Amino acid sequence: KAGVTQTPRYLIKTRGQQVTLSCSPISGHRSVSWYQQTPGQGLQFLFEYFSETQRNKGNFPGRFSGRQFSNSRSEMNVSTLELGDSALYLCASSLGTSNTGELFFGEGSRLTVL
Amino acid sequence: AQSVTQLGSHVSVSEGALVLLRCNYSSSVPPYLFWYVQYPNQGLQLLLKYTSAATLVKGINGFEAEFKKSETSFHLTKPSAHMSDAAEYFCAVSSSNFGNEKLTFGTGTRLTIIP
């Protein structure tokens, strides 16, 4: 069974640009969550999608957005990039229909903003 | 609101020694608690989870954790450290509300194993 796949793994952007990251969940999983990981702030929850609807949202500015497609694949977009957006962005999938909160993580997309 | 506090951002132990990584939680509802491990340049892997069944939880790679409600703790232990245990460990909490897939993570503890 394939795991969570994130693309691209590494990318470099400049301030003001935008970026789109992609996440393919484990087959059968309907929930996709996104986390930002930085040395200073640790792991912070961005948002969660379930059946194409945003179900939970963290405390990030509107520049951070996401969506989920009918096949459960998800994308997140960051517009008007700032230096502070440099981070490892982790995607996690789960069934979404239980309340155990067990997530399966991808290897992440490492974004560097210059 | 939920939170977890991990005491000690860096822990070093000798190979073969006991590993103890500390986690205290705060939750207004019965919590679900997790320990995840992250190896360099990789995502997070679930070590073990507590979901209100047995208070002593056994996980992968010989790790276990004990849920102590009176102490609001969920410390991670391993009797004998191995070089391959060197990684960063994260404690996380989730509410027991149905459909809440949001995890709140601690700041992490980097474990170093001394040969």
Image: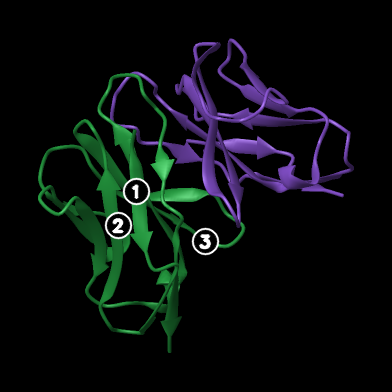
Q: CA distance from mark 1 to mark 3?
A: 21 Å
Mark 2 lies on residue? B23
The verdict on a common chain for dots 2 and 3 is yes
- Give whichever of B109, B57 is nearer the camera: B109
Q: First in sequence, mark 1 or 2: give its number.
A: 1
Give the residue type that dot 3 points to.
Tyr
Q: Quadrant of residue A104?
A: top left
Residue B109, percent from left and from top: 43, 64
Q: Is residue B105 above or below residue A46?
A: below
Residue at horizontal 59%, vertical 47%?
A: A37
| Chain with green colouring | B
Residue placed under numbered mark 1 in the picture: B4
Taking the spot 47% from the left edge, 22% from the top edge, the residue there is A31
**Residue at mark 2: chain:** B
List the residue tagged with mark 3.
Answer: B39
The answer to whether residue B27 is above or below residue B6 is above
Is label 1 in contact with label 2 (beta carbons under 8 Å)? yes
Q: Write the residue at 53% across / 41% down.
A: A44
